């Protein structure tokens, strides 16, 4: 369900159009889009228990950001990749700032942080070897 909502917003063609529209005066950037999505998807859940539906939404969104950041075959563009990189770091900061002790939510957040760390580590390793 959430994939069907996020895919059109985060598709390569939509993100390219958003970047290209800045050439014609658009002030809304990909980094602002990711900031708005970060806040909508994560911010409200930072200090409470995250429902199963929200956990699913958060994981799918995070996986889409990782896909954009790591992807070498689709032309997302450097601005979009940099914005995805920044969004991943900001999400990690948000997740690390939460102090909730409820077990299921804590495990979910640790898993998301692990996904971010692995994506950034793998990509850094690949860049060092190229």
Image: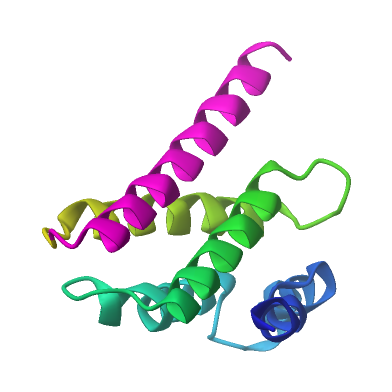
Q: Residue furthest top?
A: 129
Q: Position of residue 7 (x, y in %)?
A: 74, 76
* 11 horizontally vs 119: left or right: right
Residue at 44% in and 78% down: 54
Residue 14, image quadrant: bottom right
Assign the C terminus to one quadrant of the image. Answer: top right
Q: Position of residue 97 (x, y in %)?
A: 16, 56
Residue at 43% in and 51% down: 112
- Residue 111 shown in magenta: yes
- Residue 125 shown in magenta: yes
Give the color scheme: rainbow, by chain, secondary structure or one colour.
Answer: rainbow
Residue 102, image quadrant: bottom left
Q: Residue furthest front?
A: 103
Q: Is residue 120 above or below residue 66?
A: above
* 68 horizontally vs 57: left or right: right
Range shown magenta: 101-130
Most prominent secondary structure in the magenta stretch?
Answer: helix
* 60 horizontally vs 34: left or right: right
Residue at 34% in and 55% down: 109
* 98 horizontally vs 5: left or right: left
Q: Position of residue 83 (x, y in %)?
A: 53, 59
Q: Residue furthest right?
A: 73
Assign the N terminus to one quadrant of the image. Answer: bottom right
């Amino acid at each position: 369900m959430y994939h069907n909502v996020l895919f059109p917003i985060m598709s390569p063609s939509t993100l390219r159009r958003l970047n290209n529209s800045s050439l014609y005066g658009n002030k809304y950037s990909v980094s602002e889009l990711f900031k708005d999505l970060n806040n909508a998807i994560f911010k409200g859940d930072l200090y409470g228990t995250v429902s199963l539906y929200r956990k699913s939404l958060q994981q799918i969104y995070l996986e889409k950001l990782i896909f954009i950041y790591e992807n070498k075959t689709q032309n997302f563009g450097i601005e979009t990749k940099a914005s995805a990189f920044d969004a991943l770091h900001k999400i990690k900061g948000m997740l690390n700032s939460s102090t909730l002790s409820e077990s299921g939510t804590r495990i979910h957040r640790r898993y998301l942080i692990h996904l971010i760390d692995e994506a950034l580590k793998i990509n850094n390793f690949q860049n060092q070897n190229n």
